[in-house]
Image (cartoon, helix red, strand yellow):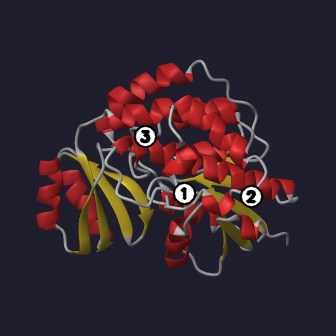
């Protein structure tokens, strides 16, 4: 039996100060950062390494407008270095922003298209301004599903695993739910809107208009999308799924379950930290995990 290899790409929350330094010796690093910095009109390489508390939010790695592009650039450099060393996946998936990296990895979108697309996407998300998000850890799934059904203005934004989800909704709805649910932790997140929920309908519509002008090419290998977790090799279908991503939940638990149908599976997380590997190790049994996050380890 041939081992299946899934490459997975994390989204916001995986950024790390110093993540660009870890890859600066890889081919293309300088060119990639220079190109994206020009489009975003700020020094993104520097932003990845600023340790001090920046007074200017435009220089803060944790500002959505910087986080998304910096993560994408780092992930794109790592995955191309793996490809250059003769590695390739059976299929790919990315969490939220990571779906863009997955589309780039499968040759559906060019690097330049992704950079422009992330500029539009992050700007729309930052300006969304409505609602908030909260992480829930250690809960009863049935109770959670019932509360989400019962309380207006709250949805599951990231269904990450059987023991961790992220909710999106109005502040009031999140407060009501937190007072009614029994869980280990309920943590409000410091974000600028209720991402992956109907609160994003307006930005999502603007994003769809922008996407119309971008051509999605045939993927080199199947891609699993966030809002429809099944293997897909049709560029038009991938575009529709990606358009729907902003106002629909990230179905990562189902993505992992789909991958786990391969008996001999190796999941390789490509990015600065091990968020997706952590989720996977707690959720899946008998699956091999590897991490590629710096120029020291372009192998698995």
Cβ atoms at labels 3 and 1 below 8 Å apart? no
Q: Secondary structure at mark 1?
A: loop
Q: Residues within 10 Å of mark 1 (few under 14, many from 20)?
A: many
Report whether 272 appears left or right of 109.
Answer: left
Residue beneath disc 2: 25
**CA gap, disc 3 to disc 1?**
16 Å
Q: Secondary structure at mark 3?
A: helix
- Say whether disc 2 or disc 1 marks the residue closer to the N-terminus: 1
Q: Which circle marks residue 65 in the picture?
A: 3
Q: Position of residue 82 (x, y in %)?
A: 79, 58
In the picture, the quarter occupied by the N terminus is bottom right
Tag nearer the camera, 2 or 1: 2
Residue 154 visible? The answer is no
144 in relation to 168, above or below: below
Q: Position of residue 162 (x, y in %)?
A: 42, 70
Q: Which circle marks residue 136 in the picture?
A: none
In the rendered image, the residue lying farthest to the right is 86
Residue 69 visible? The answer is yes
107 in relation to 92, above or below: above
Front residue (pair 82, 25): 25
- Say whether disc 3 or disc 1 marks the residue closer to the N-terminus: 1
Q: Residue at x 67, y 48 (%)?
A: 76
Report whether 88 appears left or right of 115.
Answer: right
Q: Residues within 10 Å of mark 2 (few under 14, many from 20)?
A: few
**CA gap, disc 2 to disc 1?**
22 Å
Q: Quadrant of residue 152?
A: top left
Residue beneath disc 1: 10
Q: Secondary structure at mark 2?
A: loop
């Amino acid at each position: 039996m041939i081992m299946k290899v899934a490459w997975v790409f994390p989204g916001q929350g995986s950024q790390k100060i110093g993540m660009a330094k870890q890859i600066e010796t890889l081919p293309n690093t300088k060119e990639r950062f220079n190109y994206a910095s020009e489009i975003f009109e700020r020094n993104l390489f520097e932003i990845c390494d600023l340790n001090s508390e920046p007074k200017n939010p435009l220089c803060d790695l944790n500002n959505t407008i910087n986080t998304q592009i910096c993560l994408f650039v780092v992930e794109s450099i790592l995955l191309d270095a793996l490809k250059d060393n003769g590695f390739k996946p059976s299929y790919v998936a990315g969490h939220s922003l990571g779906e863009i990296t997955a589309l780039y990895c499968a040759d559906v979108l060019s690097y330049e298209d992704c950079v422009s697309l992330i500029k539009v996407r992050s700007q729309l998300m930052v300006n969304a301004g409505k609602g908030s998000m909260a992480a829930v850890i250690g809960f009863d799934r049935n109770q959670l599903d019932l509360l989400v059904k019962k309380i207006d203005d709250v949805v599951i934004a990231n269904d990450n695993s059987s023991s961790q989800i992220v909710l999106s909704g109005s502040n009031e709805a999140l407060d009501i739910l937190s007072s009614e649910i029994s869980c280990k932790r309920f943590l409000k997140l410091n974000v600028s809107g209720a991402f992956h929920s109907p609160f994003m309908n307006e930005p999502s519509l603007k994003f769809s208009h922008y996407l119309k002008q971008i051509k999605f090419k045939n993927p080199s290998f199947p891609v699993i999308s966030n809002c429809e977790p099944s293997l897909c090799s049709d560029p038009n279908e991938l575009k529709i799924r990606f358009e729907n991503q902003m106002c629909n939940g990230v179905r990562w638990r189902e993505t992992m379950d789909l991958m786990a149908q391969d008996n001999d599976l190796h999941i390789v997380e490509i990015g600065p930290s091990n968020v997706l590997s952590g989720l996977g190790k707690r959720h899946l049994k008998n699956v091999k995990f590897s991490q590629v996050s710096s120029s020291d380890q372009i192998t698995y």
